[in-house]
Image: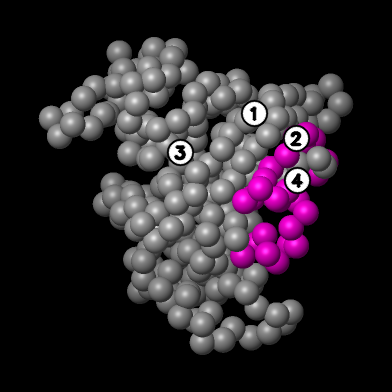
Amino acid sequence: MLEARNLSVSLGTGRLRRQVLCGLNVEVSAGRWTCVLGPNGSGKSTLLKTLAGVWHAGGVGAGAQVQGDVLLRGAPLSRLPARQRAQTVAWLAQGEPEATANDLSAYDVAMLGRLPHRGWLAAPGPQDHAAVEQALRRTHAWDWRHRPLGALSGGERQRVLLARLLAVQASVLLMDEPIANLDPPHQADWLRLVRDLVKQGHTVVSVLHDVSLALLADDLVLLRQGVVHHAGPSHSEAARAAIESVFDHRLRLVRTEEGGWVAAPC
């Protein structure tokens, strides 16, 4: 579904420029949940931004110099029409408050996800309203749809931004730290949501810091210092050994009575 070929990204300018991704090759399988995992500074968010087309392969923008290719269903992502790309790939950035107006209502924020499906200056239609209501209900944010985003708590705000992502109804959903500010019950809701999306045929890619939660994904991409340390199914012994390695054996994976795995300090 989504593929990075020989992808390198450097950030900054002049003497401050640094290489963040170094010749990555990553394949994201359709209809599966892939989790990107790694220590701080390993390039996880940079990879997601590039896969989302925020930073275009082969170009320079916002201080990012990108080399290599990102392919969507085998076609270069950067060559797709902007509307088609926005309808197909939806992206939730890490810590988005600065990017969204605080005086917009939660409903209007979620409606922003419908922009790729509407004509220039066209008013929302019945299909748009139905998609937004469904998205807000799925993230349990419907009850405060009329409240300004700036009046919501961090967790409530995050659920509205998740609803905006869902309202796009894209086949590929990229989420950078989607459970930030969510309490445990709503983290569990997010996990059920991801599983439902995958069952419906969507492709989900998430960046997480919670190793135990990441192990529930179908596939893992483990980054360390800008290179892929391991990629493949999360349930394999090789994946578990790679997780302990990329975190310098400062954690260990312990099998639970239910047969799953959780991360524990060494």
Mark 2 residue type: Gly
Mark 4 residue type: His
Q: Gap in Å between the C-alphas at discs 3 and 1?
A: 16 Å
Q: Gap in Å between the C-alphas at discs 4 and 1?
A: 15 Å
Q: Is residue 146 left or right of residue 240?
A: right
Circle 2 is placed at which residue position? 68
Question: Under tag 1, what secondary structure?
Answer: strand
- Asked if residue 70 is positioned above or below residue 201 in the image, the reply reads above
Q: Is residue 48 left or right of residue 39?
A: right
Which corner quadrant holds the C terminus? Answer: top left
Residue 24 tag number: 1
Of the numbered discs 4 and 1, the one sitting upstream in the chain is 1
Residue shown at 72% from the left, 24% from the top: 19
Of the numbered discs 2 and 4, the one sitting upstream in the chain is 4
Which label sits in the foreground, 4 or 1?
A: 1
Residue 161 horizontal/vertical position (percent)? 50, 60
Q: Is residue 148 visible?
A: no
Magenta span = 60-87
Q: Gap in Å between the C-alphas at discs 3 and 4?
A: 22 Å
Which label sits in the foreground, 3 or 1?
A: 1
Mark 1 residue type: Leu
Circle 4 is placed at which residue position? 56
Say whether residue 65 is magenta: yes
Of the numbered discs 1 and 2, the one sitting upstream in the chain is 1
Q: Residues within 10 Å of mark 3 (few under 14, many from 20)?
A: many
- Asked if residue 102 is positioned above or below residue 226 in the image, the reply reads below
